Structures are given as structure tokens and as C-alpha cells.
Amino acid sequence: MTLDTSSLQPVPLINSVVAGYPTAFTDLDRPTSASVDYVDCPDVRDPQAFAARVVGDLMLPEYKKGDVIVFSPEADINDDDDCFVRLESEHESTFKRVFFESRRRKIRLQPLNPKFPPHTVESKRVTGMYKAVTHIKTIA
């Protein structure tokens, strides 16, 4: 069987995103400018889409270390979406499920792993939020 590569778009792979609490991440103002490699993704139409490898275990069991997640800046974000979230303090970033609270003035960053508590931040601290649109799983 041959793979039809005509629908594949090269998406920049940035440094890893921690599936945990926010951590330092230098992205040179926008995620796609910090690419270290590219991954080919089917049906990704957002020219600003970017990918990151998962680090940590806070998003287990759905996402595990080494998985690649593609994020779309153009995609609408709703409660219960998994997102790459950038915070204003020193370029912090994290990968969590998001929930909007207090009329969207606060955002709860919820790990999927029940061993870890959620982290709530003021919306004004969020400098970027990008919805996960493709999950490339590692086989191990």
C-alpha cells in the first residue's frame, strides 16, 4: 500500500513542551520560528501550525513522553480542549487540557493524569494558546 503524500504539509517541530507545570521555553516570539526539525502531517491547513514532543507524565494516559502533538493557532479553542499554553512570565509554556472559569477571566490548566492537581491562571497572564489538532503517538 502506498501513502498519498500530496496532502502532507511539513510542520515545524519546536523544542519539547512539558506536559507538566509551565517551564522556560524560548520561542523567539512565535513557536514556528524556533523549529529544530519538521514533521509531515496530513490535512493540516494552518500555515502557522507547529509541533512539539511531549515531555513528562502529567498528560498520561492519553499522551506519553515522546509523542508529537501538532498545534494550530487558527483553531478555535473551547472548554475541554488540549492546548499548548504560553504564559507571560519568562516565556513559560505547558501542554494541558483547558477550562475557562469566572467568565473567561481565569483558565484552569488540567493535567489528565489524576495524580497531579490543576493549575489556575489569570487569563491576562496567557500570551498564547494553541489547540492540539493532531497526535502522533510513539510506539514503545
Image (tube, rainbow, N blue to C red):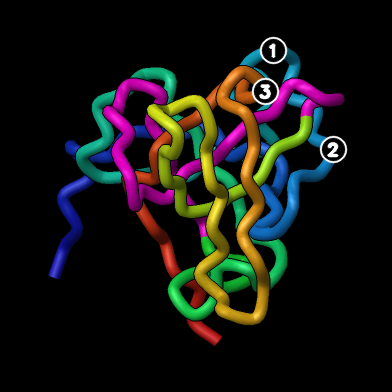
Q: Name the mark on residue 24.
A: 2
Task: Compare residues 6 and 53 and report the one nearer the observer.
Answer: 53
Give the left or right position of residue 69, taking residue 55 as reference: left
The mark nearer the N terminus, 1 or 3, is 1
Asked whether the residues under the numbered discs 1 and 3 touch, taking CB atoms below 8 Å apart as contact, a structural biologist would say no
- In the image, what residue occupies the spot 69% across and 12% down? 29
On the image, the x and y values in percent for residue 66 come to 62, 66
Residue type at the position of mark 2: Ala
The residue labelled by disc 3 is 125
On the image, the x and y values in percent for residue 65 come to 64, 70
Residue type at the position of mark 1: Asp
Answer whether residue 80 is magenta in the image.
yes
The mark nearer the N terminus, 2 or 1, is 2
Q: Which residues are magenta?
A: 68-91
Answer whether residue 45 is magenta in the image.
no
SS for dot 3: helix
Give the left or right position of residue 138, taking residue 27 as reference: left
Q: Name the mark on residue 29.
A: 1
Residue 74 against residue 80 in the figure, above or below? above
On the image, the x and y values in percent for residue 127 come to 62, 19
